[in-house]
Image (spheres, rainbow, N blue to C red):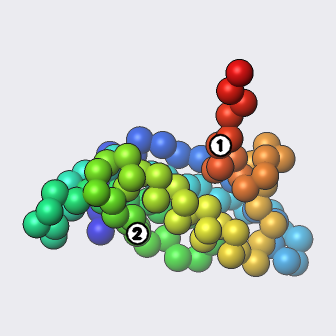
Amino acid sequence: MDLGQIVAERQIEGVAPDGSRFDVVVRFGAPRPDPLSSNGDWECPHQIVGLGDDAVQASFGVDSLQALLLSVYAVRIKLAESDSTLDWLGMPELGLTVAPQLN
């Protein structure tokens, strides 16, 4: 699968179990119509570089927003499953979960 146009990217610091440091890069491609769908579904490609499997994956939704949100969720889950310690600005869940304060 092709990542296509990159619409968002995040660089994350990693620390392996042996203490060595490395970079992890998360990329999201632009949501696009799923070419295999006969119902007008969408796909959103994503890629995690630096944890071993650099393959482009995708999440699918009934519209572009659902595909994008599910792609971010899938990346968050994959990063949480890593054996390494990952950090982005000290934020919980690497800043991939947003719960804004509404007044």
Q: Residue furthest left?
A: 38
Query: For the point 65% across and 43% down, which residue is it?
Result: 98
Question: Residue 100 or 25: which is nearer the viewer?
Answer: 100
Q: Residue furthest top?
A: 103
| Circle 2 residue | 57
Query: For the point 68% across and 75% down, which residue is it?
Result: 81
Q: Nearer the viewer, mark 2 or mark 1?
A: 1
Q: Quadrant of residue 80?
A: bottom right
> Image check: 100 left or right of 30?
right
Circle 2 residues within 10 Å: few <14, some 14–19, many ≥20: some
Residue 46 against residue 100 in the figure, above or below:
below
Q: Residue furthest right?
A: 19
Question: Residue 83 or 68: which is nearer the viewer?
Answer: 68
Q: Indicate the amino acid at tag 1.
A: Val
Q: Which mark is residue 98?
A: 1
Can residue 77 be seen from the camera position used here? yes
